[in-house]
Amino acid sequence: MRSELQDGARVFNAGDYWEAHEVWEIPWNAAKTRNDLVGANYIQGLILLAAAIHKRRHYDNLIGGQRNYQKALRRFDGCDQSALDGFNLEQFKQEVWAALEDDRLKPQLPIG
């Protein structure tokens, strides 16, 4: 995981999904400022996945969670898997989808 995203990943892994969303907004805005469209979309995808789980678990809103999940998928379009430091984005997306259905599941992001 990119160093600029690790703080958000730690918060996400602790199950604090809304807080992870907030932490990732800083590098997201920085990527937008640099006109790094791929980086900004990738980070926004992570933000939307965190928001999806938050909606599902905090508000018991499965439909809202699934909508945010679908928005995240669109943000990840065009993200080069090899540019993500070996991070398996496909597997992570599947884990998040499963967590929307099962509150016992807690998707984890690699930090180091």
Image (cartoon, rainbow, N blue to C red):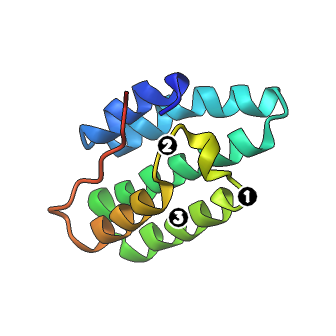
User: Label 1: which residue?
Assistant: 78
Q: Residues within 10 Å of mark 1 (few under 14, many from 20)?
A: few
Which residue is most to the right?
35
Per the rendering, the mark at residue 3 is none
Q: Secondary structure at mark 2?
A: loop
Per the rendering, the mark at residue 68 is 3
Image x and y of residue 110, in percent: 36, 38
Per the rendering, the mark at residue 86 is 2
Image x and y of residue 70, in percent: 56, 70
Tell whether 108 sits left or right of 90: left
Measured in 3D between alpha carbons, the distance from the residue under mark 2 to the one under mark 3, in whole angstroms, is 24 Å
Q: Nearer the viewer, residue 89 or 19?
A: 89
Q: Earlier in the sequence, mark 3 or mark 1?
A: 3
Report the label total.
3
Measured in 3D between alpha carbons, the distance from the residue under mark 2 to the one under mark 1, in whole angstroms, is 16 Å
Q: Residues within 10 Å of mark 3 (few under 14, many from 20)?
A: many
Q: Are marks 3 and 1 in contact (CB under 8 Å)?
A: no
At x 69%, y 39%, the residue is 39
At x 37%, y 27%, the residue is 112
| Camera-nearest label, 2 or 1 | 2
Q: Earlier in the sequence, mark 2 or mark 3?
A: 3
Tell whether 3 sits left or right of 97: right
Quadrant hosting residue 52: bottom left
Tell me which amino acid carries mark 2: Gly
Q: Secondary structure at mark 1?
A: loop
Tell me which amino acid carries mark 1: Gly
Image x and y of residue 63, in percent: 43, 77
Image x and y of residue 22, in percent: 49, 34
Measured in 3D between alpha carbons, the distance from the residue under mark 3 to the one under mark 1, in whole angstroms, is 18 Å
Tell me which amino acid carries mark 3: Asn
Tell whether 9 sits left or right of 29: left
